[in-house]
Structure formats: structure tokens, C-alpha cells
Image (cartoon, rainbow, N blue to C red):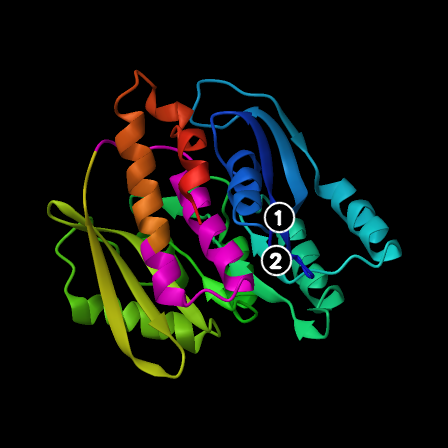
């Protein structure tokens, strides 16, 4: 057996949802399966996600600084910080401070991966105010990797949204704007392209932008975005090349959807990713 002398570690900031397979519930096993230690920081505790007809929610905002203070006492450090759903202006500020206070591990800069969960299908989530959108734009300045879906990319760049009919030049301008805002690597996901779903990939300092397409299969399901960003985050601290990581994440999500379609699983229940974790390398 290979001797492991150093294990990478990621802090994941997101809500903990007990039922529905999304957020920390999927991020912890996915990141762990890629050999990375996963340290969750809950932003809230939910019985199930909000696509269901009702739910219980415990807001964790006031507890987050106390939680982080204990990490600092223990001299905990991270190779990466993955930031998911943030429910208030105060939580965004807490995360900004976290980035400043946990800047390095083992002498290396802590990578910041921002998954700006702000909206979908051209609409901003009801919880997101104009001020929160402004603060998320500031958070992008620290992002080594930014993973918005098309709706979120449009919100962040003040670009009018359309469901389909996007030209590569239009998408490129959105991605260029996100790089100008401070992100070093960007993947804009969920671009409808007829029978395909596209993901636009670009990196600062590299002029070429690439559009990766995958055949659309099944229905949209909760939690797939969390799986996607988790793979990118774990791969980033493990030194996997960015484009290869995007391709891996696309394939894994597609495989999960294909498998789930074989079961009578409601869309709100996410994907049956557990069966495939052993194949994720």
C-alpha cells in the first residue's frame, strides 16, 4: 500500500440538509472519496431542502463565528475552502473574514472555490437581495475557481438571460467579465444547447475558451451542482488539471443521473450517487 505523507484538507461552507441529497450531504462523501479530508461549516440546518412543500430550518449565522473561533484555537488550516449557499449578507461577510483568517496551509495559499448559488432558470432566488448580489461579486475577487450556472453568471455580470439560443461569442463575453471581476478559473455550467448541455471553461491568462458538451439525459435533479463543485474543489487541491476535472465532473454527474433514472426516485430526492462513489477517482 502506498504511504500517504500528506492529506489535503478542504473546509466546506454550505447548509446541512438531512433529506434530499444536496449541499453538505453530498459534498462530504464526494470530497472524502477523492482522498481529501472534508471539514464542514454549516450555514443552516434543514430537515429537507426547500423544493419540498415544507421544511424545518435552523439558521446558523450567529453560531458560525463561534465555530470558526474554535478552529482558530486548534490552529486548523486548509488547502481549499469551498463556498456554497449563503443565506444572508452577514454570512457573506463571515466567509470573507474566514478567507482572510485561513489563508495558508503547509506554506501554500488556500484555494478558494466559489459556487455562487443564487438562482436558476433565469430567476434569482427569493432570499437573494440586490445587496447580497453585490457582496457575492466582491467575493469573486478571492475566487481561484468560480462555478456559476448560466443564470448566476448572468446575474453576476448584469447580462440579460435567455433560456437558449446562446452564441459562443456571447458566452465568452460573460466568462471574460467574470475573469475581469477577479476569478482565476471559471466554468459556466448548465447552458442549454438543443439536445446538449454545455459547460464553458476558461482560465485567466489563457486566451482560449472551451465549450464542453454532454448529451442531455433524464430530468434536472437537486444536488447535481453540489456534486459538480465538490469534484472540482477536491481535484483542485489534489493538483488535477482544471479541464480534466471539469470533464470528470460532467461524466460523473451524467452517470449518476443515468443510474437514478433506473429507479423510481422523485426529482426532489436528488441522484443515487452512492452507488458510483467507488468509481470516482
Helix, strand or loop at mark 2: strand
Which residue appears farthest toward the top when viewing the image? Answer: 264
Q: Residue beneath label 1, please?
A: 13
Q: How far apart are the two marked residues, 2 and 1, measured between alpha carbons?
A: 8 Å
- Residue at coordinates 49% horizontally, 46% vertically from top-left? 128
Viewer-side residue, 70 vs 122: 70
Magenta residues (range):
218-247
Viewer-side residue, 118 vs 147: 147
CB under 8 Å between discs 2 and 1: yes
87 up-or-down from 137: above or below: above
The dominant secondary structure in magenta is helix
In this image, 35 relative to 7: left or right?
left
In this image, 3 relative to 196: left or right?
right
Residue 180 sits in quarter: bottom left
Residue 40 location, x and y as percent?
66, 44
Residue 102 sits in quarter: bottom right
Asked whether residue 123 is drawn in magenta, I would say: no
Asked whether residue 225 is drawn in magenta, I would say: yes
Residue 205 location, x and y as percent?
39, 84
Viewer-side residue, 144 vs 244: 244
- Residue at coordinates 41% horizontally, 61% vertically from top-left? 156
Say the numbered circle drawn on residue 81.
Answer: 2
- Residue at coordinates 55% horizontally, 67% vertically from top-left? 138
Residue 199 location, x and y as percent?
28, 57
Residue 81 location, x and y as percent?
61, 58
Viewer-side residue, 152 vs 20: 20
Which residue appears farthest toward the front when viewing the image? Answer: 1
Residue 77 seen from this side: yes
Residue 220 seen from this side: no
**Callout 1 crowding tier (Cα within 10 Å): few <14, some 14–19, many ≥20:** many
Helix, strand or loop at mark 1: strand
Amino acid at each position: 500500500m502506498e504511504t500517504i505523507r500528506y492529506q489535503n484538507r478542504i473546509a466546506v461552507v454550505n447548509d446541512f440538509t438531512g433529506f434530499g441529497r444536496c449541499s453538505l450531504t453530498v459534498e462530504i462523501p464526494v470530497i472524502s472519496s477523492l482522498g481529501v479530508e472534508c471539514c464542514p461549516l454549516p450555514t443552516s440546518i434543514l430537515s429537507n431542502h426547500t423544493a419540498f412543500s415544507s421544511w424545518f430550518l435552523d439558521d446558523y449565522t450567529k453560531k458560525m463565528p463561534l465555530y470558526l473561533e474554535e478552529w482558530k484555537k486548534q490552529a486548523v488550516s486548509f488547502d481549499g475552502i469551498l463556498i456554497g449557499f449563503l443565506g444572508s449578507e452577514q454570512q457573506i461577510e463571515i466567509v470573507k473574514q474566514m478567507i482572510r483568517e485561513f489563508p495558508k496551509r503547509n506554506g501554500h495559499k488556500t484555494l478558494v472555490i466559489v459556487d455562487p448559488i443564487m438562482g436558476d432558470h433565469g430567476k434569482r432566488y427569493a432570499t437573494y437581495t440586490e445587496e447580497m448580489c453585490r457582496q457575492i461579486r466582491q467575493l469573486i475577487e478571492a475566487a481561484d475557481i468560480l462555478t456559476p450556472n448560466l443564470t448566476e453568471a448572468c446575474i453576476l455580470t448584469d447580462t440579460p438571460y435567455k433560456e437558449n439560443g446562446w452564441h459562443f461569442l456571447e458566452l465568452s463575453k460573460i466568462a471574460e467579465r467574470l475573469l475581469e471581476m477577479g476569478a482565476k478559473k471559471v466554468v459556466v455550467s448548465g447552458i442549454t444547447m438543443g439536445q446538449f448541455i454545455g459547460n464553458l471553461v476558461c482560465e485567466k491568462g489563457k486566451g482560449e475558451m472551451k465549450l464542453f458538451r454532454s448529451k442531455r439525459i433524464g430530468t434536472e435533479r437537486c444536488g447535481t451542482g453540489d456534486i459538480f463543485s465538490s469534484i472540482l474543489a477536491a481535484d483542485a487541491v489534489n493538483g488535477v488539471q482544471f479541464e480534466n476535472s471539469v470533464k470528470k465532473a460532467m461524466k460523473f454527474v451524467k452517470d449518476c443521473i443515468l443510474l437514478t433514472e433506473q429507479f423510481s426516485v422523485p426529482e426532489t430526492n436528488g441522484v443515487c450517487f452512492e452507488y458510483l462513489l467507488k468509481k470516482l477517482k
